[in-house]
Every structure is written in structure tokens, then in C-alpha cells.
Amino acid sequence: MGHSQADKAASRTRILAAAAAQIRENGLESVSVGSVMRSAEMTHGGFYNHFGSRAELITAALAFALEESMPAKPRVSSERESPDPERLRRLARGYLSRSHRDDRQSGCAIAALAAEVGRADDRSRDVMNGYVEGFFGLVEQALGEGREEDALLAVSAMIGALQISRVLTDEKRSDQVLKAVRDAVSALANED
């Protein structure tokens, strides 16, 4: 990659990072090209060197936010992996933690944006769908073969608990929600 190509790629990444932070904090429709470009410390006119439209930026920024916030990647293997309950317990502890709850700007983009993306255009829904399915796959790998329904339950509970814990104004109650779901997911990990 030539120097100018490397610079262009770095600039695009800065734009996507700024837009992803804005999306997580304020939603898809909050994206303003001018604001994103200022946050990326670039001129408004440079935007069109990277994206054809605001809609294209929103879709790319959503994918960037989702990629950046995935708790872990599902391992792809031709062989079936052994269940790894401790992996699921670690995931639940990190995902359902106070620090993750309080990190709205760089925390899980699925939890931050699921309701809004559910009402968005098909491009945004397609992007998020892939990451939600990846999250299901990650948890199913940890639980083991034949535990798809438990994986669906665990992921849905974790995302919902994170969303609800961010809404509650009483910190003790919010912590209680996180702990209850963390304990329930850990119990699923202990089942055979």
C-alpha cells in the first residue's frame, strides 16, 4: 500500500470511529457529516473522498461500531469444539459489568442500537443481523452442541439486561439486574 493509500485508509478509520461513537451515544439519525468530520479533525469537503453519501457512512459506521464492540469472535473450525462453560462465564462477567454498563460510547453497539436498528432500513438491519447471529454462535460454541435455544436465551437476556441496567436511575437496582442475569447465564453454563 502506497503512502497516500495508507493515509486514506487511516483517514477513513478516523471518520468511522468518530461516526461510530456518535451513533452509539445518540443513535443512527444523530449522524451529521459536519460533526463527524470535525470530530475526525478533517474538513467537510474531504468526506466525499471516502463515502458517497450520509447513508453509506451510517451503514459503514454501524458495522465499525459492531465490530469494535463484539465481546469476542466465534472461532471457526471444521471440527466441533468441546463446550467451554468458563468462557461463557467470563463473557457474562465482562458483558454484564458496571464498567460495560457505564461505557455507552464504546460499549456493545447491539445493546445501544437494537431498538433503533429494528426500525431502520434493511441495510442497517442486515449489518446488525450478522453480528447478532455471531453473538449467538459464540455463546453456542461455549455451551456446546445442541444448546442453540440456551444460547438464544443467554444472548437475549444479556443484551436486554444491559439495556435495562442503563435505563434504571437507581444504581443498586441496576447492579441487581446485571447480577441476576449474570448468575442466570452462569447457571446455564453449568448445565449439561
Image (spheres, grey):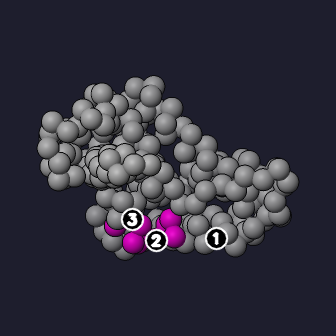
Q: Tag 1 or tag 2, which sits nearer the N-term? A: 1
Compare residues 35 and 1 and report the one nearer the observer: 1
Q: Which residue range is magenta in the image?
A: 94-102
**Place of residue 133 in the rendered image (x, y in percent of width and height, measured from the top left):** 61, 43
**Place of residue 169 in the rendered image (x, y in percent of width and height, measured from the top left):** 28, 64
**Residue wearing tag 1:** 89
Report if residue 180 is visible in the image: no
**Residue wearing tag 2:** 97
Compare residues 99 and 131 and report the one nearer the observer: 131
Report if residue 109 is visible in the image: yes
Residue type at tag 2:
Ser
98 inside magenta stretch: yes
Instruction: Measure the C-alpha gap from mark 3 to mark 1.
Output: 17 Å
Q: Tag 1 or tag 3, which sits nearer the N-term? A: 1
Q: Residues within 10 Å of mark 2 (few under 14, many from 20)?
A: some
Label 3's element? helix
* Residue at 51% over, 70% down: 94
Residue type at tag 3:
Arg
**Place of residue 18 in the rendered image (x, y in percent of width and height, measured from the top left):** 27, 51
Mark 2 and mark 3 in contact (Cβ < 8 Å)?
Answer: yes
**Place of residue 32 in the rendered image (x, y in percent of width and height, measured from the top left):** 19, 39
**Residue wearing tag 3:** 101
* Residue at 39% over, 35% down: 59
* Residue at 75% over, 67% down: 84
From the viewer's perspective, is 100 left or right of 144?
A: left
Instruction: Measure the C-alpha gap from mark 2 to mark 1.
Output: 12 Å
Mark 1 and mark 3 in contact (Cβ < 8 Å)?
Answer: no
- The part of the image, by quadrant, that contains residue 81 is bottom right
From the viewer's perspective, is 36 left or right of 55?
A: left
Which dot marks residue 132?
none
Q: Residues within 10 Å of mark 1 (few under 14, many from 20)?
A: many
